[in-house]
Image (spheres, rainbow, N blue to C red):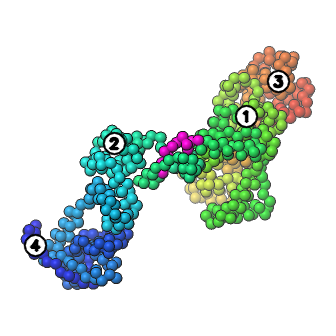
Amino acid sequence: MNDQSNIPVTFEEIPFADLHISDLNPRKVVNEASIITLAENIRAYGLIQNLAGYRDETGVGVVVGGRRYRALALLQDDKRFQSVTVKMAPDQATAEYWATSENAQREALHPADEIQDFGAMEKRGATVADIATAYGATEAHVYRRLALAALPCPVINALRSGDISLSNAAAFTISDDEKLTLEVLENVRGTGESDHRIKKMLKPDAIKDSDRRAIYVGIEAYIEAGGRTSSDLFADEVLIDDPAILDDLFGKKLTEASEGLIAEGWKWADPINDSYIGWYQIDEMKLARIYAEDGELTEEQGEEYDALAELAESDALDDEGQAKLAALQSILDGSFTDEQKAHAGVLVYVDSRGTVQCETGLIRGTDKKAAIEAGVLAKSNYAGSTGTKSPISNKLRIDLERIATGARQHAALRDPDLLLALLAFQLSGKSGYSSVLGLRETEVPNIPTTEMVGYALDERLTKTTRPAKFSSDMGRVFRAYKAKGPEFIMEEVTRHLASRLFVDEDLGEMIDKAVKTNIRENFTPTAENFFGRVGGPYLVNLWCELLDLPEDHPTATTFAKLKKSEKADKMEALFGDPKMRKAHSITEAQAKRIDAWLPEGMV
């Protein structure tokens, strides 16, 4: 290595036009924004550190100070920088040493030193803009450093000694209680505690402005009510320091929203503090659900809806169009009648985004009888059990679900266009995480364990296709399949889509209305598929319910004395044998009730 101890150094004033970046300069990647900031610094304070260069055949190559050279290039409108003092290397070996050493030995200020210097500059009267220019930093960076400079000295000293990290120090800026700050500092010094835990120690009750309650109430309303806030510059958030005030405002505003719904005609509206209301909560509250009456669009409105929806899909819909689309969607969604509202209520809550939401059309247990009598709520199909345990076994329930699925598939065959639309709905990703069709290797089950006893489906749902022989030429097999023509292909698509129809409750309800699903069209309860699989008391209660019999009626008491198998056979005859109905003088109303009856969970 060359001896650098006695290098003959000279300084020359070089016209900027004669300078260029030397190939020896190791810095190849630069941040253009930082060059602009550096140029502002040089214009304000001058060139504090000289460039270093080496004369070659094309002029003077800058080996040290590539960023400064690029910044000076932006300042050539200023005569002060049209010539530059350059420290000249006597030979190429020295120039190479300078180029490497200057960049390798550079060390930035320790954050603690920079923080204290920022604070000292501010005390001397420097503005944030002045400090930003001097340091070549953004004003946001300066604001954050000044927030750290306001911390008690022990916190900065702990940062300097490495007892806490820079992000730990930033966490302390949310506190305006010096005594608590120093207590927490001693608890976390040298422990590697997380920033989140430090913030919780400093302000255990503080709530972020991103909290759903804060969004719903609004920061301005909270402050107007006397609530205090503090800022966390490092997380770009505001902290709510008086949660009790926020909770009070939140409860009052949610109550006002609930009262507004009652004014709209709902029988009741309860504010709920949860951020989500699911089916399990509604079930726990013993609430029955009714649905709004479907709405219909005129042909002209339908065309407008399709056009607006297409624009919305491509994010090309303006505010006016969005409003029109929302209005048309509201018509499609339907509305609750005044009579429905008179028997039902609403659960009102605020979701995680701070938006008020409503679960509408809910009927309390105490209101169910009146709702049934008014025709607003359908009567439960099960009236036999007085306990909480259902008489329907899990295996039987699965069979009933399969039967209901098969009935829906059976009805969907009437509307191939709907099936194709559902296919597009799922394949496009529009359905999100909800599966519309069972497009998997396994089929969607629609045959119960009792096979086809009392159960009938369109043969297209039950016939099988013989697979091609092993090692067949699949190209030839497909060509032969396709050659059967578009009518055959459409028939195949329709039946296979129908056989894989598998949707959630809300979408299923819409489909059932569209295709007029009628489970009893496919399923008739028999001793084997249902009655023989439930308990005797259930059958006795059902017998009385269907025939309008009091428990002490001779027909009821005679039925109750039968063996379970005899009860099951007698129930099967009631559902399928005209002679049995004639023997018991079944009225027209009773016959309709029997012909429409389904076990619980199937409607």
Give the numbered dot on residue 364.
1
Tell me the kind of residue under disc 4: Ile
The N terminus - image quarter: bottom left
SS at mark 1 in the image: loop
Query: Of discs 3 and 2, which sits in the foreground?
Result: 2
Q: Residues within 10 Å of mark 2 (few under 14, many from 20)?
A: some
Report the Cα–Cα distance between label 3 and label 2.
77 Å
The residue singled out by tag 4 in the image is 7
Tell me the kind of residue under disc 1: Arg
- Answer with left or right where residue 255 lies relative to residue 581: left
- Answer with left or right where residue 381 lies relative to residue 46: right
Evaluate if marks 4 and 2 touch, with contact meaning CB atoms under 8 Å apart.
no
Q: Nearer the viewer, residue 267 or 482?
A: 267
SS at mark 4 in the image: loop
SS at mark 3 in the image: helix
Quarter-of-image position of residue 23: bottom left
Report the Cα–Cα distance between label 1 and label 3.
26 Å
Q: Residues within 10 Å of mark 1 (few under 14, many from 20)?
A: some
Q: Sequence-wise, which precedes: disc 3 or disc 2?
A: 2
Report the Cα–Cα distance between label 4 and label 2.
53 Å
Tell me the kind of residue under disc 3: Cys
Q: Nearer the viewer, residue 334 or 458?
A: 334
The residue singled out by tag 3 in the image is 544
Report the Cα–Cα distance between label 1 and label 2.
55 Å
Q: Residue at x 16, y 69 (%)?
A: 97
Task: Read off the magenta span.
Answer: 238-248
Q: Nearer the viewer, residue 491 or 49?
A: 49
Q: Residue at x 63, y 45 (%)?
A: 253
Query: Of discs 3 and 4, which sits in the foreground?
Result: 4
The residue singled out by tag 2 in the image is 182
Return the x and y of residue 207 as percentages of the image width and height: 49, 45
SS at mark 2 in the image: helix
